[in-house]
Amino acid sequence: MLPQAAALSLFIVVAVLVAAVFAGVALSTRQPHDPGAAAATRLRRWFAGVLGTGLLAALVVTLLHLPYPRGRAHPDLVIYGVGMQYAWGLSTSPITTQDEWQNSTFANPIDVPAGSLVEFRVTSFDVNHGFGVFDPSHHLLGQVQAMPGYENRLQLRLTTPGTYWVFCLELCGMGHHLMRGEFEVVPPGAHP
Ligand SMILES: [Cu+2]
């Protein structure tokens, strides 16, 4: 299951549970009764115990699956990504000046051979941006902050051929929604 689909399913399940608890509490107030201090304390202790155990178990299980690379793999291709209001400059060679950035925004989309491990080296020439990489069906594959003065790296293995998009994930001004970049993933051997 895609992470987004899993997150959405989990959200719906939790939202229904929370709504059910609220509805149960709301209905229970129709017949008010005093459970007594001792019973209330027992219930609170039981609740704290279950919640604490559940959270501790969730922490132990999920800590093993942090979405960070365990070691730096050697990438097949490096793509430099520079954000500036309101476009992404993408290039396979470093973008160090505003002219190079301008040229990269007008250049033909980069061709990435399918199956490549791509390392995005991301920065910004003005304000903070969010560098979000989306596959051809517009699913978010990964994101990294684009920060002026810093180079942040994101490694992704891109397997499905098609047009990939870079959208800005941090509100950076009036033209934020226009801020996009694109590149192509092509079947291996389809391009020199
Ligand atoms: Cu933005």
Image (cartoon, rainbow, N blue to C red):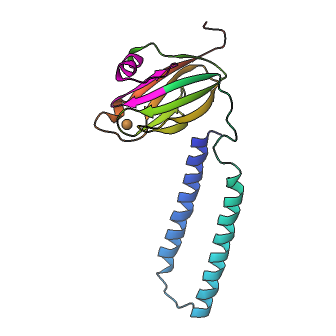
Magenta span has 33? Answer: no
Residue in front for this viewpoint, 67 or 16: 67
Q: Nearer the viewer, residue 164 or 129?
A: 129
- The residue at the point 50 percent across, 69 percent down is 22
State which quarter of the image contains the C terminus. top right
Task: Inspect this view and state whether residue 36 appears.
Answer: no
Query: Dividing the image into 4 quarters, which one contains the N terminus?
Result: top right
* Residue at horizontal 51 percent and vertical 64 percent from the top: 19
Residue 181 point in image, percent of width and height: 44, 25
In this view, which residue lies farthest toward the top?
A: 192
Up/down of 123 relative to 56, above or below: above
Residue sitting at 54 percent across and 66 percent down?
20
Q: Is residue 88 magenta?
A: yes
Numbered marks: total: 0
Residue 44 image offset from top left, x and y in percent: 60, 81
Task: Give above or below for 163 relative to 10.
Answer: above
Q: Quadrant of ligand 1?
A: top left
The magenta segment: 81-105
Q: Nearer the viewer, residue 54 or 33?
A: 54
Name the residue at 43% across, 37% down.
149
Res 188 quadrant in image: top right
Indicate the position of residue 4 as horizontal and vertical percent values. 57, 42
Picture layout, residue 35 above or below residue 9:
below
Can residue 93 be seen here? The reply is yes
In terms of image quadrants, where is residue 128? top left
Going by the image, does 15 lie left or right of 71?
left
